[in-house]
């Protein structure tokens, strides 16, 4: 009996080994470009294009209904329908001659220049002002500084924060690009005499100031800097 069972075990092991060899040959012997229709269906089922996805159960193409453009396309079409404004038209003109012009970067630079200019004006830093203003605006600032110095007055300016800054106008004037921004800021402005007494302003009061400044740049030059060419205030 023992020898009979051993003989049966040997036959079973041989059958199992033969089965494993056939399975290995069926798997390893198949080329990755095999024309196996089941393999092709599994690959197509994961296509990135949903209209090309297939039902792996029978290999038939699943026809997906066309519901129109996706959200991104709809947004682009909606943007194209928006009426052109004078500001967008002016910015388009500027970008046509200065492709590197970027709205966001410009606003960041304009806000930084605003802080530097009002601080330089308060401190009477004419060298810095001369590098940031055109001749007309510089002369106006210089006249105010000289008048203040003649009266022995000192201006103390504290920029608490910039509340907002936005473009409100853009246009080309020959080869000169012009962009006007409106900046709303909170400031504390105090003018003191030679004895330190307050002659104008309130050191304990924060004022909201709205300034409208125009910056310009000659697009025909290699100088990328914008200069302040006009200022006005709503206050």
Image (cartoon, rainbow, N blue to C red):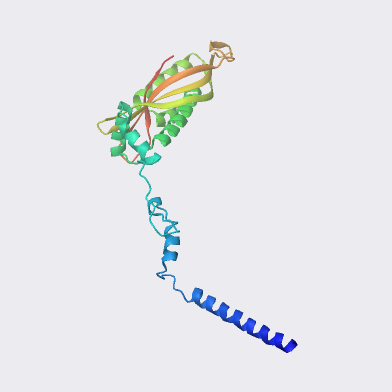
Q: Quadrant of residue 32?
A: bottom left
**Quadrant of image for the N terminus:** bottom right
**Residue appearing at x 72%, y 89% in the figure:** 3
Q: Is residue 227 rendered to the left or right of residue 172?
A: right
Tell me where residue 83 appears, x and y as whole percent: 30, 28
Residue 224 appearing in the image: no
Q: At which x and y percent is residue 194?
A: 56, 14
Measured from the top left, where is residue 30 in percent x and y?
46, 74
Residue at 33% across / 36% down in the picture? 77
Task: Report the number of numbered marks.
Answer: 0
Would you identify the image quadrant in which residue 133 lies?
A: top left
Above or below 69: residue 231? above
The image quarter containing residue 178 is: top left
- Expressed as whole percent of the image width and height from the top left, the position of residue 10 reads 66, 85
Furthest toward the front, the residue is 1
Above or below 224: residue 10: below
Please tell me which residue lies in front, 46 or 81. 46
- In the rendered image, the quadrant that contains the C terminus is top left
Q: Give the residue drawn at x 48%, y 29%.
A: 116
Looking at the image, residue 221 sits to the left or right of residue 110; the answer is left
Q: In the image, what residue occupies the spot 60% across and 81% down? A: 15
Residue extending farthest bottom: 3
Vertical position of residue 6 compared to residue 188: above or below: below
Q: Camera-side residue: 15 or 89?
A: 15
């Amino acid at each position: 009996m023992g020898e009979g069972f051993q003989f049966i075990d040997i036959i079973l092991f041989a059958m199992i080994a033969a089965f494993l060899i056939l399975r290995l040959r069926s798997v390893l012997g198949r080329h990755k470009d095999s024309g196996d229709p089941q393999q092709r269906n599994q690959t197509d089922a994961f296509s990135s294009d949903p209209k090309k996805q297939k039902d792996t159960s029978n290999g038939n193409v699943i026809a997906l209904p066309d519901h129109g453009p996706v959200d991104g396309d709809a947004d682009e079409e909606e943007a194209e329908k928006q009426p052109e404004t004078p500001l967008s038209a002016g910015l388009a003109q500027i970008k046509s001659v200065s492709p590197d012009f970027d709205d966001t970067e410009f606003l960041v630079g304009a806000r930084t220049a605003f802080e530097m200019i009002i601080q330089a004006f308060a401190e009477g830093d004419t060298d810095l002002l001369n590098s940031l203003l055109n001749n007309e605006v510089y002369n106006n600032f210089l006249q105010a500084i000289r008048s203040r110095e003649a009266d022995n007055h000192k201006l103390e300016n504290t920029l608490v924060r910039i509340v907002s800054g936005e473009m409100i106008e853009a246009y080309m004037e020959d080869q000169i690009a012009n962009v006007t921004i409106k900046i709303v800021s909170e400031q504390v402005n105090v003018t003191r005499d030679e004895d330190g007494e307050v002659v104008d302003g309130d050191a304990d009061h924060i004022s909201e100031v709205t300034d409208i400044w125009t910056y310009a740049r000659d697009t025909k030059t290699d100088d990328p800097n914008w200069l302040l060419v006009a200022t006005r205030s709503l206050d």
